Amino acid sequence: MAGSNEVNLNESKMVVPLNTWVLISNFKLAYNLLRRPDGTFNRHLAEFLDRKVPANANPVDGVFSFDVIIDRSTSLLSRIYRPAQDGEPQLNIVDLEKPMTAEVVPVIIFFHGGSFAHSSANSAIYDTLCRRLVGICKAVVVSVNYRRAPENRYPCAYDDGWGALEWVNSRSWLQSKDSKVHIYLAGDSSGGNIVHHVALRAVESDIEILGNILLNPMFGGPERTESEKRLDGKYFVTIQDRDWYWKAFLPDGEDRDHPACNPFGPKGKILEGIKFPKSLVVVAGLDLVQDWQLAYVKGLEKAGQEVKLLYLEQATIGFYLLPNNNHFYTVMGEISNFVSSDC
Amino acid sequence: MSPYDSATSSGGGSGSSASSSAKPSEIDGLLAGAGYKVRSSDLRHVAQRLERLETAMVNSPAEISNLASDSVHYNPSDIASWVDSLLSELHQTASMPSDLPDLPDLMVAPAINHTVLSDAAWTDQDAPQQLNQFTVVTAMEEDSGIRLVHMLMTCAESVQRGELAFAGSLIEDMQALLTRVNTSCGIGKVADYFIDALRRRIFSPQSVCFGGSGSASLYENEVLYHHFYEACPYLKFAHFTANQAILEAFDGHDCVHVIDFNLMHGLQWPALIQALALRPGGPPLLRLTGIGPPSPDGRDSLREVGLRLAELARSVNVRFAFRGVAASRLEDVKPWMLQVGPKEAVAVNSIMQLHRLLGSDSTRNSPVEVVLGWIRNLNPKIMTVIEQEANHNQPGFMDRFTEALYYYSTMFDSLEGCALQPEKALAEIYIQREICNVVCCEGLARVERHEPLGKWRARLGQAGFRPSHLGSNAFKQASMLLTLFSAEGYCVEEKEGCLTLGWHSRPLIAASAWQAVPDANPPLGIVNHHSNHNAL
């Protein structure tokens, strides 16, 4: 590995802007320090290194945010982002949960990435992303601070996602004029995985989800696919680290055929004939797990579910974190269309 | 292909500019939005360091666990210095060795819409005056709760406009509404306290603000403080992080002198004494100077505390000397009273005291400048500053009231989980007194003039201090301290070398450490790492 290092790093440098390269490489190296070979995680150092930002009820660039406790027993927090009304300089504590004025307002429940182990709803990169989503989609964004692995394995993250969904669905102040909450689920990396599984759980309930948005979703399986072998270590991510995160999230003793990891694998649920939300799946062409992501899309298609694939050939993981590349704008445009097409 | 306009750029910082050519000395705006501080001109250099670090890590995998567990990390926002510190831990030299090829000019994909922030913006000086950060308790769903808050705001607004009669009638209405709300917890409890504070402001401010410094009142204060100390971790966090910084600053010194700006019962010091006792190489001679209000009833309470601490020090074989300095106000303390010796390593410890210096009549030098001035002249090895992380010193009443409502709501919420009685009840009274001072008092009587970390940073920078970063070791130990508390929801965060303790993502108390800048050069508001570059 030592000899081929320089080549790998140069390849990744060719395809992303310099500041993106610095950002993602910084994460990569920091994360290397946090994953221990014995499967434990250096949580203290992780929290120390993670850059966080507070909520801000003063509108900044037309968006304000505040945190709510959804479930005290698990300390489940979510950060709510709302568009500020024009000419509204200062908000009262009362205004935060004011009903919305527009005819239809999409509410996007967002699950941040981090391979189930890293980041939080108040991580700077995700706070920034959620703020952008508000502006672009004219939506309310609810970013869920779900419990993370390895301290909290499957199904904690899904339980928290479900809890957030129920909470959002029951808020009268999040309703559009038709007295319904227009819910979309969105997430990147592990967040994308959570989107699928929360939507799956919702199928058996009377909560309607209008659409799923999966950005570079985290899926996997026991085999090594062609894309994993081809792209291992070349664009910030290695097979080895992917294995570590699955091992940290999945129940002890389970392999990557577990349906949480491989929803269309041998242990997956059958999706034919059920009312599953339409999906927008974004796959980065330089993401080594793309074969699993494409298999996911195929799985949805074969089950007769509505799915749109957005394949970005030259994109790496994390391309959506900084608005300095064309993929970013393409994807944001697609997401905006996706959540407004039901209005 | 059309780039989005600046309205969608990073939301957390100050206003953005959609300039296409970044001035080299400016911080990369997109990385700033991600919480990192890198100059645009340094990006290439930082990238190279990251590469070197990766190579080093790959080549010595056994070292990685050391880097993670034993190394102390500082100020992760400054990627360059973080990477460099890891590299030096991996025994790499700071200069670029000749065997690494010069990296080719990076053909990077064109970056669109580089927003940039100047250095000045980074130090929060231009940040909006209000920092309304808070956690909303879900009990807000209750209609009566919402109405109460609405009325509180209206009442505060009337007070600001001077319509005291109307405000007074609102008090009555609110008290009536309170009977229909659960005031034992949640929004009802918080509203209860704030209605009470407004009532006092409108009807009897004198009773609050000039209540007295009699012996009963001082004794009460100490009791309440002690219960606040027990009921929630804020003071323990303060003591703990300060002691950590002081211990490190005293490393290698044989004569050390701690100056405590508010001795109280000296709860902070047993831990430091014990840590010094266990120091490899043996403990130093420790002098402690404790400042506190004079005891009105003939007791010398400062001396009593000193005697107890001396007893403890004796029991662990630490040579110890104590001196009490009685002063009603910190600004009455003169440096000669502290009798600092020339060879001593001095630590100045200020736990929620500096903000009390911010009220002043404009006819004389501002007390905070005077005090910071003489502290600087003492050339302390470390000055630990712990302050409430809130903006309660704004000139407008409405702003202060709103901010206080948010801040103390969060603090009360954190106390809900406390099962200890009477600690919890008395801690609430302790907090209530703070609320009353913020809401009811004006002028010199208003001493609870909390300001957020960004403002203290600027103020201390102006006064000739530079930050001494608190690292991952202090962070980890503070986090572990929190696990002793059953209420899950407390969180420690690192922000540019300072640590904050908060409840459910809202920081409530901020701890920082400072050193005097050696010469009378222009004061630094941020750590300047140009020197690192020169060394390469």
Image (cartoon, grey):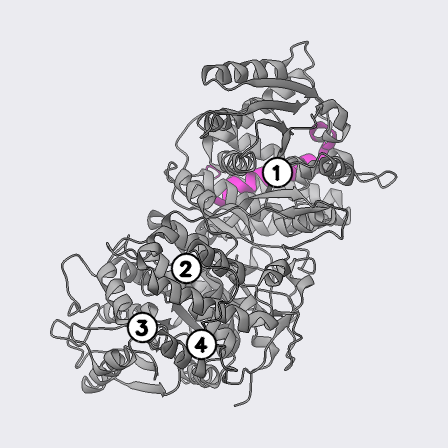
Part of the protein shown in magenta: B183-208
Q: Are marks 3 and 1 in contact (CB under 8 Å)?
A: no
Q: Position of residue A202 (x, y in %)?
A: 26, 69
Asked if residue A175 shows in the view, the reply is: no
Q: Which residue is mark 4?
A: A320
Q: Which residue is mark 1?
A: B382
Q: Residue furthest left?
A: A266
Q: Residue furthest front?
A: B98
Q: How many marks?
A: 4
Element at label 2: loop
- What is the distance, in whole Å, between disc 1 and disc 4 at their CAs? 43 Å
Residue A120: mark in rendering: 2
- What is the distance, in whole Å, between disc 3 and disc 2 at their CAs? 26 Å
Tell me which residue sits at (59%, 13%) in the image: B304
Kind of residue indicated by mark 3: Glu
The residue mark sitting in front, 3 or 2, is 2
Tell me which residue sits at (61%, 25%) in the image: B263
**Quadrant containing the C terminus of chain B in the rendered view:** bottom right
Q: Is residue B145 above or below residue A60?
A: above
